Every structure is written in C-alpha cells, then in structure tokens.
Image: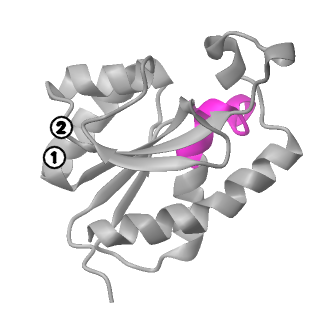
Amino acid sequence: MYNYTMFAIIGLGNPGEKYRNNRHNVGHMFIDYLVNELRVNELKLYKTDCFMNQSGAFIKKVMRNSGMRRENLVIAHDDLDIPLGKFKIQKGIGPQLHNGIESVEKSLGTKDFWRIRIGVDNRTPDNWIDGETYVLNDFRQNELDVIQALFPEVLNRLQTLW
C-alpha cells in the first residue's frame, strides 16, 4: 500500500505523567495515535525520553543506532506559530522559537529534515500568556478533541511523502 521503507517519526515532548497532556507533548500524542492506527514494521516510531531541550541528543542517538538517514527522518512537534487544529508538513522550516527543534538542528548540524508542525496556539488577546508557560499547560478537553480529530488528516498528508 504505502512505501514506509525506513522512515522514522519521532515525537517530541517531555517525559512523565505530569506532562502527558501538555501542549508541548503533542508530538508524543501523535506517536500514540500512529501506534494505534498503523500496523507496519518498516515505519519506526519513537517518543523522546528526555526533556524537550535535550531532544537533539536523543534523535542523534536514534539515528546513529538505527542507521537512519536524515532524509527519512520526520519530527512531530508543537508549534505556536500555527493555530490549534492546523498543521504543516515541511522540510527545513520550523517555528520561530522552539527549544526542542533548536536542539535537534544543533545536534544534527542542519535544518534539513522533515517536520510535522502541529498547531497548538489557541490564545486570544484577552487570555494571552507567554509561549513558554502556555505550552507547559495541559490542553483543555475541547482542545484535545480538536487535536485528536486532526491526527487522521496529518497521517493522510504524511503518507504522500512515502
């Protein structure tokens, strides 16, 4: 059906139950969705086991241990530059500020990898808080519903890469 040959999707997030439903953990949530939806061995799925700011070391280790090529690497992460319920799949383009992505770029020595940029911004002028605080807050239930409804669309678009 699809050619999954040696693709790896790595979801960024923070470890532990405390962070499970944080906006910053939408990459982990996407991996959980894929584990339940896909039944292929060729596609490697990972969730980082470190804090967001150390994501680069985790990804570099996965690539070294698996022999993964950078062109087959896909990073799923939250993005405050994109509204809640929207996403972009792009190569070499990321959010303005994202410590996890910055760590990955620094560890790999390049920006040239695929990103699934999942929008998490649902702030309005009357409830505006700084991004660093906002992404460490849990999604509200209605926001989780929007995210869960978005994941099938992300997967459909992602399959066009294969």
Quarter-wise, where is residue 75 in the image? top left
Left or right of 47? Residue 70 is left
Regarding residue 82, the answer to whether it shows in the image is yes
For residue 32: magenta?
Answer: no
Residue beneath disc 1: 70
Check disc 2: other Cα within 10 Å, few if <14, some if 14-19, many if 20+. Answer: some
Q: In percent of the image, x 18 and y 37: which residue is there?
A: 112
Q: Nearer the viewer, residue 147 or 30?
A: 147
Label 2: which secondary element: loop
Colour mapping:
one colour
Q: Which residues are magenta?
A: 14-28
Q: Which residue is mark 2?
A: 112
The image shows residue 56 at horizontal and vertical percentages of 31, 27
State the quadrant of the C terminus. Answer: bottom left
Q: Position of residue 149 (x, y in %)?
A: 70, 62
The amino acid at mark 1 is Arg
Taking the spot 52% from the left edge, 55% from the top edge, the residue there is 31
Q: CB under 8 Å between callouts 2 and 1?
A: yes
Q: Is residue 27 magenta?
A: yes
Q: Residue at x 33, y 71 (%)?
A: 160
Q: Amino acid at mark 2?
A: Asp
Q: Is residue 149 left or right of residue 70?
A: right
